Image (tube, rainbow, N blue to C red):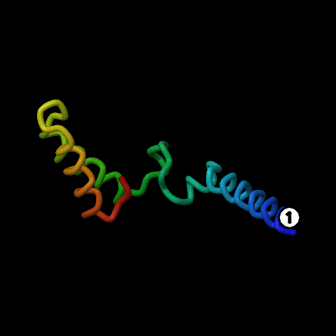
């Protein structure tokens, strides 16, 4: 009986992973590469955060540039 449960769990997990990796799921979440599908708030946040982070060159400041970008996106309530 445990073998049947394992296979059932594996199949359920595979179906879930397949559904979550589909392009339609990504479009509903707003994380597509197509600029036409990005909200105005996200576009504004991307522009502002990139402008803040570009002041710190990666080869000079190391990870600081990434930390500035991440903090800025968090301030705007956006994913990185």
Q: Where is residue 67 shown, x and y percent of the image?
A: 22, 50
Q: Would you place residue 2 above or below residue 21 in this image? A: below
Relative to the observer, which residue lies in front, 9 or 80? 9
Q: Where is residue 45 shown, x and y percent of the image?
A: 29, 55
Q: Within 10 Å of the Cα at label 1, are there few (<14), some (14-19), or many (20+) other Cα atoms? A: few
Residue, disc 1: 4
SS state under label 1:
helix
Query: At x 25% / y 64%, what residue is drawn?
Result: 75
Query: At x 69% / y 52%, what residue is drawn?
Result: 18
Q: Where is residue 41 shown, x and y percent of the image?
A: 34, 60
Relative to the observer, which residue lies in front, 49 or 35? 49
The answer to whether residue 74 is left or right of residue 59 is right
Give the image quarter of residue 19.
Answer: bottom right
Pick the quarter of the image with the N terminus.
bottom right
Q: Would you place residue 16 above or below residue 1 in this image? A: above
The answer to whether residue 10 is left or right of residue 3 is left
How many marks on residues? 1
Q: Residue furthest front?
A: 2
Query: At x 17% / y 47%, what residue is drawn?
Result: 52
Give the image quarter of residue 12.
Answer: bottom right
Query: At x 63% / y 53%, what residue is drawn?
Result: 24
Q: Residue furthest top?
A: 59
Q: Residue furthest bottom?
A: 1
Q: Where is residue 70 shown, x and y percent of the image?
A: 27, 53
């Amino acid at each position: 009986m445990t073998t049947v449960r394992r296979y059932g769990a594996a199949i359920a997990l595979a179906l879930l992973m397949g559904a979550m990796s589909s392009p339609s799921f990504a479009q509903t979440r707003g994380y597509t590469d197509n600029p036409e599908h990005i909200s105005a708030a996200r576009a504004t946040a991307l522009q502002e955060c990139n402008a803040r982070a570009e002041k710190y060159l990666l080869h000079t400041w190391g990870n600081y540039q990434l930390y500035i970008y991440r903090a800025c996106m968090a301030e705007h309530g956006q994913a990185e």
